[in-house]
Image (cartoon, rainbow, N blue to C red):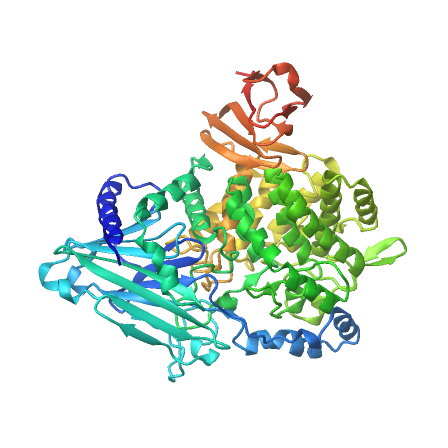
Amino acid sequence: MRKHLFVNILALLQCTALLAQVPGRHNLSFTQLAKRWDEAMPLGNGLLGVLVWEKGGNMRLSLDRADLWDERKAFDLNKLNFRKVEDKVKQNQYADIQQVGDAPYDEIPYPTKLPAAALELDTKAWGNVVSSTLDINTALNTIHFTSGVVFTTYVHATRPYGRFLIAHLPGNHQGNVIPRLVMHRYATDGKQPVSDNTHAGEGLSSLGYQQGQVTTTDSTSLYHQPTNDGRFYEVLVKWKRIGEDTLAGCWTISNNTTVMQDISAADKGDDWTTHIAWWKQFWAQSAIALPDSVLERQYYLEQYKLGCVARTGAPAITLQAIWTADNGSLPPWKGDFHNDLNTQLSYWPAYTANHLTQAATYTDWLWKIKPNNEKFTRQYFEVNGLNVPGVVTLSGDPMGGWIQYSLSPTLGAWCAQHFYWQWRYSMDSAFLKSRAYPYIKGVAQYLEAVTRLQHGQRKLPLSSSPEYRDNARDAWFTDWTNFDLSLTRFLFTAAADVSESMGKPAEAKHWREILQQVPQLATTAKGLSIAPGLEQVASHRHMSPYMAIYPLGLLDENKAADKWIIDSTLQHLASLGTREWCGYSFSWMACLYARAYQADSAVKQLQIFATHFCSPNSFHLNGDQQGGVYSGYTYRPFTLEGNFAFAQGVQELLLQSRRGYLQVFPAVPSGWKNVSFTRLRGEGAFLVSASKTDGVTRSVTVAAEQNGTLRIRLPFEHWRIRQLAGERVKKEGPGIGSVYLHKGETVVFESAEN
């Protein structure tokens, strides 16, 4: 390593001392190291991740890389298609389908996400931990020991490596400090992984790899691990002593290339400066302030995690992203891409929080795997166009599983919503032309082809609702479920919208005509149902029947007919209780309540999530960690979608993008007297800021990033205009105004009621 590395590390040490004087109130801070990997300090840059904790008396850094995958095929798509599934369902021979479509996912360990390795340090001579703090402003973990030793580490925001620094080493222990690379147990050795209630899979030895080798010198340690089909990955750690009491090092992970190619960037001299510059820009995008300290802290920890896991050029967010389980086993649900809920919810908060760059990592990945998804659509559904499997590998190949959802006929529409959102929140005409329009059109063409026209109405051959009736034959319906129906209605609406915006009125007209052939949502006296005539009769974790309320926004509380449906639905859901809910259910329910303006109920769901379903480090653990107070699920598999849906639940209290207009403070509890936000993003590429002081909203500021008409529902009925000619603003109703704004213009609405 060159001189630059150590100059940067010394600057980091000096900066660390300064940062320790002004810790943020939302930081993670503990007086000991976590004893479990899923309670560790998390750091990352979208591609690389690390968890800092203690194992066996040593400090352990669990190292991970997002694109480490074993993509060997277990599910043979050649043996199955949608027509065959329909026939077997009608013949009551569904066991045949389960054996082909579902069994391989459970019985064969691959395809799967892979953990990389761990780095351990013997810290016994350093004394006890005094404090371990993760400064989320700079993504820096600092650990103080009673001996005076200070350990700091971070993953560079934009470069493929992590750094660590050990300062103030006792003189008689300096020579004993050797970073040790720890291999995962891929070879069969007869030992079984310890069960930790995380829904982990088989031991890693089930993959059949040859055990890797570690080669160590006096300043480096290199781990080479063969994987499948001649592939491999490497982990490299380099370190050097500086002066009498400091050791500095860095690490990186390569995927099927020599690791030295990834570590070369570590010699640059602007390391810490470029790292904190990225995080400074990230945090400058938006901000909120809530009177509820628990919700505000959890919100900022979710935003921090979003910054860690979503980065341009990196894969989309999987179940655990860059923090694969370090417990000797395959990760829960193989750490894969679940497009029947998990990937979509993980990106919900990115749009309103003004993190479109992070949101684009999902659409970038979906675009990259689009050719494989189109091939899947032709092969499985036997039509042209585009659909997306519900459970896929890094390359977008279907993995099977419960095929009602892993091979769902409508998940392409849910994926397409993110292309639609990326366009609507940015109003980027280039993105519309190159990505949103062709992607949405491809899904629309598929849905038109796969549905059948009977007596003037379109119908799916088979329909389902995740994860209603789990994997049974009767989880298939011969009539529309509201899940599939909502997604289909949304998709044809979006297809007409993007076609119109592309200057293709004939196409827009066609999609509107197709939409007219799609039935209306199924309802009963208790609101939205699972399917026609089938009410939800028991608590259930997945809110799939209620997609039309959120995230699709097909129903609007401000319309009388919709209001009855929404209010009745939520009342019925509340009567069923939460015993079968997971953590993400509460986050999603908060969004549903916010859309119905039921602020207190929305906040209650968020509070339950933050206090009962999260690890001390804020990770969503799915089960109720307080002994099952709110849910019968008490296990602890870590997945990220609940965390990010929580963040969106908070944002839905403050700013909502509804169909055709924005609404400010739509669901703020009456008890919240002081609440504010800055630069939250609404559809139409409008950045909105507002504050409520002593229970009164005095002004709302809206800045336009693109030319367009702003329609807004304000938190006061009467206003005056500042920074813009008032006569340009049209009043459309009490508290509702519209104005055409040019790119770069700002309008300030001031309450005229005070």
Residue at the location (65% across, 79% down)?
Answer: 99
Residue nearest the viewer, comparing 208 with 33: 208
Res. 645 in view:
yes
Residue nearest the viewer, comparing 284 with 553: 284
Q: Is residue 508 above or below residue 257?
A: above
Classify residue 176 as left or right of residue 406: left
- In the picture as drawn, the residue positioned furthest to the left comes out as 172
Residue nearest the viewer, comparing 121 with 215: 215
Residue at the location (39% across, 43% down)?
Answer: 279
Residue at the location (32% across, 51% down)?
Answer: 268
- How many numbered badges does the structure rendering display? 0
Picture coordinates of residue 81, whole percent (x, y): 73, 71
- In the picture as drawn, the residue positioned furthest to the right comes out as 455
Q: Is residue 647 above or below residue 735?
A: below
Picture coordinates of residue 583, whole percent (x, y): 50, 55
Q: Is residue 563 above or below residue 45?
A: above
Res. 40 in view:
no
Classify residue 63 as left or right of residue 218: right
Residue nearest the viewer, comparing 17 with 502: 502
Picture coordinates of residue 14, whole percent (x, y): 21, 44
